[in-house]
Amino acid sequence: MIPFEAFVEVAGYAAGAALLVAAVGLVLLQVLRGRSMAVQMAVVAVATVLATVAGIVVITLLMMISEHDRSVALTVVVVAGLIGTGVSFLLGRRLIAANRRLVEAVRSDPYRTPSAVLPAELAELSRELKVAYDRLSASHEREKALETSRRELVAWVSHDLRTPLAGLRAMSEALEDEVVVDAETVRRYHGRIRTEVDRLTEMVDDLFELARIHAGALRLSRQRVGLDDLVAEAVAGAEALARAKGVRIHGEAQSGLPLEVDAIEVSRAVRNLVVNAIRHTPNDGTVEIRGEIHDGPDGDMACVTVSDACGGIPEQDLPRVFDVAFRGEAARSPGGGAGLGLAIARGIVEAHSGEIGVTNEGPGCKFVVRLPIGG
């Protein structure tokens, strides 16, 4: 049995020789870090073989093994090393081929996951690239939709601004030039001017609110508020409009259900839905607002529904009802600004991590707002 001191001495010399070769190999890997994986793997294999050979040479010299035995040992190690180097080179070639397939998939449009079997790491990278591409595609589609909405908004706002401004100019010039002098007509002109100014002010407020929503600058001031209070406030705020239109309005909600929301913003969203419903409900029709609790996959949700008697929305228009300035064939916002009310309602609801939707039901439409109980 080899003495412990001799074992330590042999191990030390062998380790020193192997570490020297390993250091040279690390330097080569650093120099060749920009080369292909096949080259780097070949360097690793050669360094491993040389480190083993160096250790065997040192051991055979210290142990005074015969020249024949030393030659046999070195031959075995060199042959094994050459085979290992060849295997490493082949493996590197496979990795390069897999990497090329992945690069081709990335360069294709749209991105397609390679059909060939990839190494586990590259397969995981391929899946992550697919997820990233899908996100970028969705973001690009949203950007295109937003750009389309912006163009529509500019067109609608330009039209809706031009009409009242033309009327204001005509009436102000008539008053200034004293074309109109009788008291009744002057009073009617003044009333009309006030009405148009209020309409323009409402439009500017809507544009400002929508700009804040799209810019992500909508800051929510959450507080506890009852669902029944929100519904009652929406009904009270729309009663005058409903009475003038000859529309019945009715609302009810569960009492004692607190929500953590920005009461002002949520009230505005519900009010926009109610006003929209009243404007599109014929005389002697009914608008109904209900507040309830519904079970959801992530917990209980407060649900506010606004049902009208508008006659329904064409099925092809339903997905775009909440788009900026969208009016569709039925002109969902005639005489009510630039058609921003529903877009603002959606922005406010989504800012609260809620959902908003619309379906055709009964004599008209049912708008549904779902908000998390905890806000």
Image: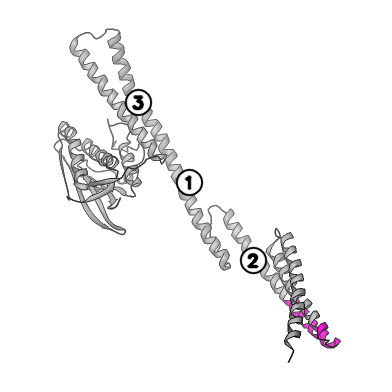
Earlier-in-chain disc, 1 versus 2 = 2
Checking the image for residue 161, the label placed there is 3
**Does 3 sit left or right of 286 as displayed?**
right
Q: Secondary structure at mark 3?
A: helix
Which quadrant holds residue 288?
Answer: top left
Which quadrant holds residue 251?
Answer: top left
The residue under label 2 is 95
The residue under label 1 is 140
Q: CA distance from mark 3 to mark 2?
A: 63 Å
Task: Choose between 88 and 94: the one closer to the eye.
Answer: 88
The amino acid pointed to by label 3 is Leu
The crowding category of the residue bearing disc 3, from other C-alpha atoms within 10 Å (few below 14, some 14 to 19, many at least 20), is some
Q: Secondary structure at mark 2?
A: helix
The crowding category of the residue bearing disc 2, from other C-alpha atoms within 10 Å (few below 14, some 14 to 19, many at least 20), is some
Q: Is residue 307 visible?
A: no
* Picture residue at 50% right of the left edge, 54% below the top: 132
The amino acid pointed to by label 2 is Leu
Checking the image for residue 313, the label placed there is none
Q: CA distance from mark 1 to mark 2?
A: 33 Å
Measured as percent of width and height from the top left, residue 316 is found at 33, 45
Compared to residue 315, the image places residue 122 above or below, namely below
The range drawn in magenta is 60-83
Measured as percent of width and height from the top left, residue 87 is found at 69, 74
The amino acid pointed to by label 1 is His
Q: Is residue 300 magenta?
A: no
